[in-house]
Image (cartoon, grey):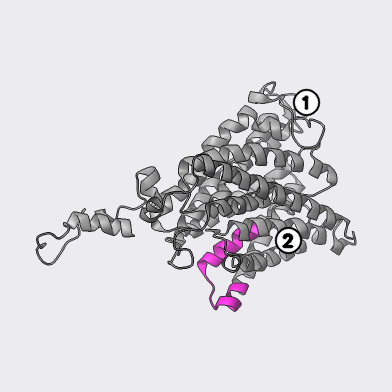
């Protein structure tokens, strides 16, 4: 390896990349537990398919658009690295191989569109969703990643601090979810039928996997096994715990109970909020960001009922609002430039400019993409598919085999009268109803 290569840093970044990859299946469990039983597999697949689509597009042109040298306007990278051209196993960026950095950033690109899927649960055509992912990462994620993280990007040059993705990942995904759901409309039965999570244990499992993987997300963004990574690690833990407590406190006062769904959602809100700030604040700043984000996001998830938009799994309330809170609070708690450090309002203004620019761009382009797909191919499932269950409609499978509990039949105490449905038909109907 050439001079400057560090084996420890490389091993650290590769492990962190693997942790971030685990976050996408973790997200699938988190979302999958929150939906009704008839759309569990579809929810899992909406996250899982991103691993396939984005991995291919990333090496084809995504890495080049996001991290190629700027073309001059601060908006997009050049195409010098199409197909990873010119990069070898010994090509370095800092102390690690470019391939290690590219793999790490690939996992960010994979999970970001997967985050959007929660806003569209129960009602999107799977084929349309796959097309949306491909178009969205090309026109939204890759350019925004360049703006925020590449040295020539206009948000980077503005001085906006985003260590691990408050703007590029969470505000971006949250506002994209809002844009797309405005096109798809509300689920059939929204605010009328019960739409409770079908498996809170799955939700808790998914939240735990996300929390575990997030250490790779945040600490790994240091791109070295050093003190910055350690600070990001401990701030991630502290803020997440504080956000869980903040959410539960709000929930107890507002609704009278401490729920497992609230604990899981509060933890995710804290992870989201500390992401941009984890290397910029001290421990007390991380605590402040966590508590504020937990309470604010708990409040924000209720906005969909007041404003009438159907954000199925609270992507807007947790990711857009949580990402916005964490990005703006850097201007308050930053240990060198924040208000609490005597830095004035300059950094807060810069943070606001970057956050609102990404929010506006993602909302507008995502709405246009969803509208174009809906007009041409149709983005929304039919009423029959939605009511009957999109697992069966799009995947020809169901998550749970209820019939097997009774050996494939429902046992009855009396003979079946002529003209009545057979036990097998009863079992099949029970499965569909569930």
Question: Residue 42, position in %: x, y?
Answer: 44, 48
Question: Neighbour class for label 2 at 10 Å: few (<14), some, many (≥20)?
Answer: many
Q: Residue at the location (15% across, 64% down)?
A: 412
Q: Residue at the location (76% across, 48% down)?
A: 228
* The residue stretch that appears in magenta: 250-271
Q: Is residue 12 above or below residue 303?
A: above
Q: Is residue 16 visible?
A: no
Decide whether residue 270 is among the magenta residues. yes
Question: Residue 400, position in %: x, y?
Answer: 34, 53
Question: Residue 181, position in %: x, y?
Answer: 56, 53
Element at badge 2?
helix
Q: As rendered, which of 310 and 203 lies closer to the eye?
A: 310
Q: Is residue 299 visible?
A: yes
Q: As rendered, which of 394 and 330 lies closer to the eye?
A: 394
Element at badge 1?
loop
Q: Residue at the location (71% across, 50% down)?
A: 360
The residue singled out by tag 1 in the image is: 3
The residue singled out by tag 2 in the image is: 286
């Amino acid at each position: 390896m050439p001079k400057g290569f560090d084996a420890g840093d490389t091993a650290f970044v590769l492990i962190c990349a693997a942790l971030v990859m685990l976050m996408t299946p973790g997200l699938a469990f988190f979302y999958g537990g929150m939906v009704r039983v008839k759309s569990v597999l579809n929810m899992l697949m909406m996250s899982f398919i991103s691993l396939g689509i984005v991995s291919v597009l990333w090496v084809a042109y995504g890495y080049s658009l996001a991290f190629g040298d700027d073309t001059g306007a601060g908006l997009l990278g050049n195409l010098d690295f199409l197909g990873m051209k010119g990069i070898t196993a010994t090509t370095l960026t800092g102390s690690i191989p470019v391939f290690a950095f590219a793999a790490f950033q690939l996992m960010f690109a994979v999970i970001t569109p997967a985050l959007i899927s929660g806003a569209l649960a129960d009602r999107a055509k799977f084929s349309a969703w796959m097309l949306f992912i491909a178009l969205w990462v090309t026109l939204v994620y890759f350019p925004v990643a360049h703006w925020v993280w590449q040295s020539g990007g206009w948000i980077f040059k503005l001085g906006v601090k985003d260590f691990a993705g408050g703007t590029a990942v969470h505000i971006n995904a949250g506002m994209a979810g809002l844009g797309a759901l405005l096109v798809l409309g509300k689920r059939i039965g929204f605010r009328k039928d019960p739409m409770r999570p079908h498996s809170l244990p799955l939700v808790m499992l998914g939240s735990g996997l996300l929390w575990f993987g997030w250490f790779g997300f945040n600490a790994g963004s240091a791109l070295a096994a050093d003190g910055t990574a350690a600070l990001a690690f401990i701030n991630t833990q502290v803020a997440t715990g504080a956000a869980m407590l903040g959410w539960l406190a709000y929930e107890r006062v507002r609704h009278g109970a401490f729920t497992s769904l609230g604990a899981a959602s509060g933890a995710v809100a804290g992870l989201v909020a500390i992401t941009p700030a984890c290397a910029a604040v001290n421990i007390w700043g991380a605590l402040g960001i966590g508590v504020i984000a937990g309470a604010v996001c708990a409040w924000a998830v209720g906005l969909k009922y007041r404003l009438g938009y159907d954000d199925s799994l609270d992507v807007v309330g947790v990711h857009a609002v949580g990402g916005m809170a964490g990005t703006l609070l850097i201007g308050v708690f930053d240990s060198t430039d924040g208000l609490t450090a005597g830095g004035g309002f300059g950094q807060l203004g810069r943070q606001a400019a970057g956050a609102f620019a990404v929010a506006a761009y993602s909302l507008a382009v995502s709405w246009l993409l969803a509208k174009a797909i809906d007009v041409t191919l149709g983005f929304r499932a039919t009423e029959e598919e939605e009511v009957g269950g999109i697992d069966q409609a799009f995947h020809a499978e169901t998550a749970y085999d209820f019939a097997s509990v009774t050996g494939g039949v429902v046992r009855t105490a009396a003979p079946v009268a002529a003209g009545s449905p057979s036990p097998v038909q009863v079992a099949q109907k029970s499965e569909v109803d569930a």
